[in-house]
Amino acid sequence: MPVLLFGAITATYYAEPSLYLQVQPGPYTSDTVIGAKLGFLEVTTDGEEIYSPAWGSTSENILPTLVYGDMRWYDQPSGPFIPLSSHPFHIMSVAYRHGYPGQPTITKVDHPYSPIIDNGPIQVKVSPFRVELYLVNTDSTNRNIKVKSQWPDRPAIHFLEGFVYTFDLLFDPAYSFVVANQKGTKVNEMMNLLGEPNSNGSYVSVGGNTGSNSIPIAPGLNPNTPGMPYGPPQTVIFSVALSDLSTTFDLAEAVGSNRKVVNTMTIIVYNGVVGANYSQEVVFTDTSSGFDDFRLLHEEGGSVTIPFNLFFGGTQVTKGEPIDWDTLQSGSDNIKTIQIGGIDQNAIDSLASGTYSDTISVEIRNP
């Protein structure tokens, strides 16, 4: 199996966390086109050129993907919406050969492999090189195509806004990213009939994965639930709550390796997709100005302070630095405890008696 082992090319695929049908998806300009963005591939190089890039392992594209739901009949743009209808959608590749944003090159993802620009030979000199994937109601590579209300086509007006469409149970595309080893090689000269590279081409590692079907195009998506809503996605809302406004405890409870739970944070995700991960940044600071760490201050003032460690979900917090909580789930309570520990016993033995306190501020923000 040919594999690129050198580090000149780095590729990452970013899948959409959920699918939404929209009019004029991506590069398409006509309101007759409807589709959903699946994700995009970003390829960076160390100044190297990319030769004849192609999608490999695309045998599943031998047939279009059927989308199911309420639709108007082919030649009736003002007719009733008919339940349990179906229409073939196609996966279209949109490459920005000369940089993004810029002039797109649209190709239909074919089988068993598919050139990203054309059969070539091709040289891509831009870095990063961006390639998007869309599921669309047309297989036209013309971005200005106007889909007609005529068999076998259905324009966007034949689909019901607000309806949640589902797709074929077999819809689970997984591709690979392949490039030629040398300049001047065409795509069909480096690929075999199984959609794999021969000695003239090589797989590129994408997100650390290499080989046939190494790029899940729509990972984690269930073909029937939640489906593909037609219309703009709802804004995801994060509701944050702390269990206590203040906490009193004995310093001995947080000495050394002891950890005292002083609060609990709950984040609830609204309007999210069940099963998808969402992310928020959590930043902790306190009122002990002039210190890089967290400190308890004597209630009567003075220069004596007590350093302590703060823990969030079991992980020690660095004051002022964001913590990425990237496993937030919709439809359930996301809970983490806030703890104090690491107080030096020898230090507090020599301190004046009294009450020591600190005010900890918590900031929640988008990453």
Image: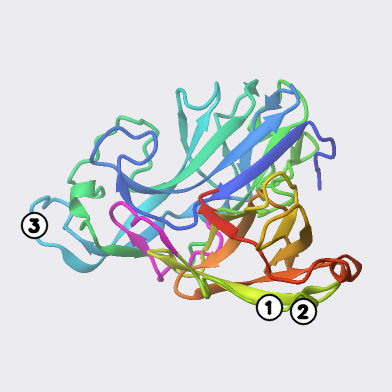
Residue 125 relative to residue 151: left or right = right
Q: CA distance from mark 1 to mark 2?
A: 7 Å
Disc 2 residue type (three-letter)? Glu
Determine whether the residue tagged by mark 3 lies in a helix, strand or loop. loop
Towards the viewer: 203 or 268: 268
**Residue 253 got which mark?**
2
Within the image, what quadrant is residue 27 found in?
top left
Q: Confirm whether residue 152 shows in the render.
A: yes
- State the residue at coordinates (54%, 65%): 328
- Magenta stretch contains residue 25: no
Instruction: Report the span colored magenta.
Output: 218-239
* Residue with the mark numbered 1: 249
Towards the viewer: 119 or 54: 54
Position in image of residue 290 (x %, y %): 71, 44
Q: CA distance from mark 3 to mark 1?
A: 70 Å
Determine whether the residue tagged by mark 2 lies in a helix, strand or loop. helix
Towards the viewer: 220 or 142: 220
* Residue with the mark numbered 3: 79
First reached walking from the N terminus: tag 3 or tag 1? 3
Position in image of residue 26 (x %, y %): 39, 38
- State the residue at coordinates (36%, 55%): 235
